[in-house]
Amino acid sequence: MRGETKHYVPVSALIPARPTLSTLTRAASGCKGCDLYLKATQTVFGEGPAGARVMLVGEQPGDREDLAGKPFVGPAGRVLDEALTEAGIDRSDVYVTNVVKHFRWEGAARGKRRIHKKPRSWEIRACRPWLDAELAIVQPEVLVCLGASAAQALLGRNFSVTRQRGELVDSPLAPEVIATVHPSSILRAPDAETRRFEMTKFVDDLRKVAGVLASARRAA
Ligand code: URA
């Protein structure tokens, strides 16, 4: 905020020894790893069981998430929930989080609306230790990147969601890693027919995840 002195503390210094999801969440609530904490309402940490088989990673909390303090509870979250159900993925198998834990926004020219702004690369880098700690605890069988910001942050800057969505990719982050579109892109479809088409493709990508889970269960 205007007038407030910026005071960054590297995230690595905040991560507790032998963290659990609840101690991490508590530590992250005071995060000042970059300047996003100055304008956001609160940290929005990941949510879900420590034993989740799937980790879904989005970009950053949106307006609703910033106010609620929970990831994917706004319109994009509703699209995500509907697609997970259609793909046959149980929410109790899922941990949801973001590459950046604070809402980055700008005021609209008129009015009070807060306009989402993409996080910058140094903000993603500053926040990364939180995600690495979440991965180390949850150890998901499948990691799913939702949209280009998450995919490029986790799989490299040259990763193209348009070309590589729905493909299993090699990564040290989890046994199986896949990227798909961000659910908010479905909300931005120009008409109902395109929206239905994009939703079908999104569900198809998530069905691949469900297939991986089913074959891992059979092999166990
Ligand atoms: N978009 C995201 O990427 N994450 C959320 O939590 C909500 C919207």
Image (cartoon, grey):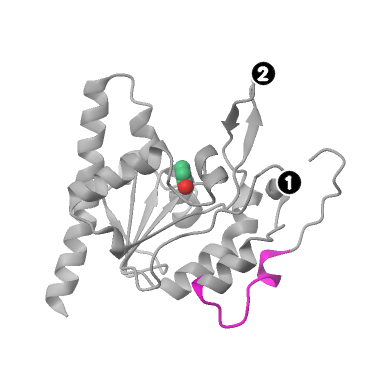
Residue 182 seen from this side: no
Quarter holding residue 39: top right
x and y, in percent, of residue 105 in the image: 62, 35
State the predominant SS element of the stretch in magenta: loop
x and y, in percent, of residue 165 in the image: 30, 46
Q: Depth check: 173 or 116 in front?
A: 116
- At horizontal 32% and vertical 70% (from top left) the residue drawn is 175
- At horizontal 56% and vertical 66% (from top left) the residue drawn is 25
Specify the segment rendered in magenta: 10-21
Quarter holding residue 217: bottom left
Which label belongs to residue 211? none
Which label belongs to residue 38? 1
Which label belongs to residue 109? 2
Quarter of the image with the N terminus in it: top right
Residue 72 belongs to the span the image colors magenta:
no
Residue 20 belongs to the span the image colors magenta:
yes
Counting residues from the start of the chain, the first of labels 2 and 1 encountered is 1
Disc 2 residue type (three-letter):
Ala
Q: Depth check: 164 or 71 in front?
A: 71
